[in-house]
């Protein structure tokens, strides 16, 4: 209750008067002061909050702008805040960069969600080619004898037909598995080999799909904002989402073998422990979780 009262008081009274006082003391609006004080994710995050909680409708709508309208939106903001481009030449550049990151994050979520909703279709030739590509990347010296085969268990699928394992994450799960195997082939081979450990082994593909769900949920909850705002100076794309997925795969394998679970039956417990670890790292406004090999 106390927190709710503080939020109400801050939003309706204290913040307004603080902004008014600082504006008269510095001669600059809150947005300009943020640009003068912060860089990286802190800057974009604070700009996003300032726009979101503004009483000005034009500023509020700026967080919802599409990428093609960013330039016009920046002009509208400068007009509303009476910012002279000759006196503050950097404002336009900084605001555009922030809005591209903000709108880009929203668009990235929509793009990822669109792919996730697309189920694996064994009648789709592109889907089938992608699945066989995964096999060839992970098992280059071993020929797949049949499309439906017990061999799929060799790379960590549960049944004879992998399509059933993609139900939760759709084609996104397969795309992530292929991306990691194609761009970090030696690491993928190493992790696949480690996943066959007699005591600490786990199902490589199933865990990979599970980590796709983790990456997706972190994106959806906006927990990836600090990371992406630091990692991507411009517009975050699917490529950057795949890169974060690769980080999760590599780090989870290290985490699993460091923890040494007694049994695969404890997977959910250790998966959640790893999830909490990642969420903790993502709270750091300077975070940038990249795969370093």
Image: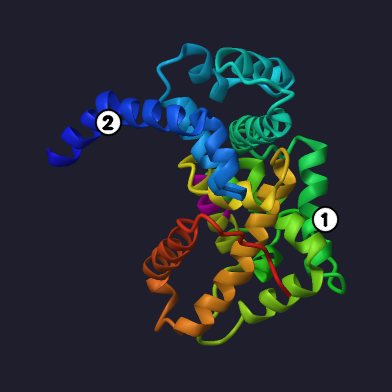
Q: Which residue is at the front of the view, 270 or 19?
A: 19
Q: CA distance from mark 2 to mark 1?
A: 59 Å
**How many residues crowd mark 1 within 10 Å: few (<14), some (14–19), many (20+)?**
some
Q: Which tag, 2 or 1, sits closer to the chain's start?
A: 2
Q: Please tell me the numbered disc located at residue 144.
A: none
Q: How is the image coloured?
A: rainbow
Assign the N terminus to one quadrant of the image: top left
Q: Which residues are magenta?
A: 212-217
Tell me if I can see residue 97 in this picture: yes
Q: Which residue is at the front of the view, 134 or 114?
A: 114
Q: Please give the residue where the numbered disc 2 appears in the rendered image.
A: 14
| Residue that lies at the very extreme toward the left in this rendered image | 1
Q: Residue at x 32, y 27 (%)?
A: 17
Q: Locate residue 166, reporting x and y percent.
A: 60, 47
Q: Quadrant of residue 187?
A: bottom right
Q: Locate residue 89, reporting x and y percent.
A: 73, 30
Assign the C terminus to one quadrant of the image: bottom right
Q: Please tell me the numbered disc located at residue 133.
A: 1
Q: Residue at x 59, y 71 (%)?
A: 251
Q: Locate residue 208, reporting x and y percent.
A: 60, 60
Q: What secondary structure characterizes most of the magenta part?
A: helix
**How many residues crowd mark 2 within 10 Å: few (<14), some (14–19), many (20+)?**
some
Task: Judge from the rendering whether residue 32 lies leftward or rightward of residue 264; answer left or right.
Answer: right
Q: Quadrant of residue 185?
A: bottom right
Task: Judge from the rendering whether residue 73 lies leftward or rightward of residue 30; answer left or right.
Answer: right
Q: Which residue is at the front of the view, 128 or 230?
A: 230
The secondary element bearing badge 2 is classed as helix
The secondary element bearing badge 1 is classed as helix
Decide whether residue 69 is among the magenta residues.
no
Q: Residue at x 63, y 52 (%)?
A: 230
């Amino acid at each position: 209750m106390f927190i709710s009262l503080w939020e109400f008081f801050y939003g309706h009274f204290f913040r307004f008067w603080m902004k008014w006082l600082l504006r008269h003391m510095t001669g600059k609006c809150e947005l300009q002061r943020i640009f003068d004080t912060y860089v990286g994710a802190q800057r974009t995050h604070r700009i996003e909050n300032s726009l979101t909680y503004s009483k000005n409708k034009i500023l509020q709508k700026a967080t919802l702008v599409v990428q093609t309208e960013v330039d016009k939106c920046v002009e509208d903001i400068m007009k509303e805040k009476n910012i002279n481009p000759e006196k503050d030449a950097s404002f336009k550049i900084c605001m555009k960069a922030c809005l591209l990151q903000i709108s880009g994050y929203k668009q990235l979520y929509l793009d990822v969600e669109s792919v996730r909703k697309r189920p694996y279709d064994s009648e789709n030739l592109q889907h089938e080619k992608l699945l066989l590509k995964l096999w060839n990347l992970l098992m280059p010296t071993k020929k797949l004898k049949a499309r439906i085969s017990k061999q799929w268990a060799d790379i960590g699928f549960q049944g004879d037909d992998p399509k059933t394992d993609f139900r939760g994450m759709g084609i996104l799960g397969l795309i992530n598995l292929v991306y990691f195997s194609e761009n970090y082939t030696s690491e993928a081979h190493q992790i696949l080999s480690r996943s066959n450990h007699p005591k600490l082994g786990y199902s490589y593909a199933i865990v990979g799909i599970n980590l796709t769900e983790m990456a997706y949920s972190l994106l959806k909850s906006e927990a990836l904002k600090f990371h992406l705002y630091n990692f991507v100076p411009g517009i975050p794309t699917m490529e950057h989402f795949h890169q974060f997925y690769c980080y999760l795969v590599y780090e989870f394998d290290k985490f699993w073998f460091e923890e040494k679970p007694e049994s695969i039956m404890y997977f959910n417990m250790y998966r959640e422990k790893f999830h909490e670890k990642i969420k903790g790292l993502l709270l750091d406004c300077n975070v940038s979780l990249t795969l370093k090999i």
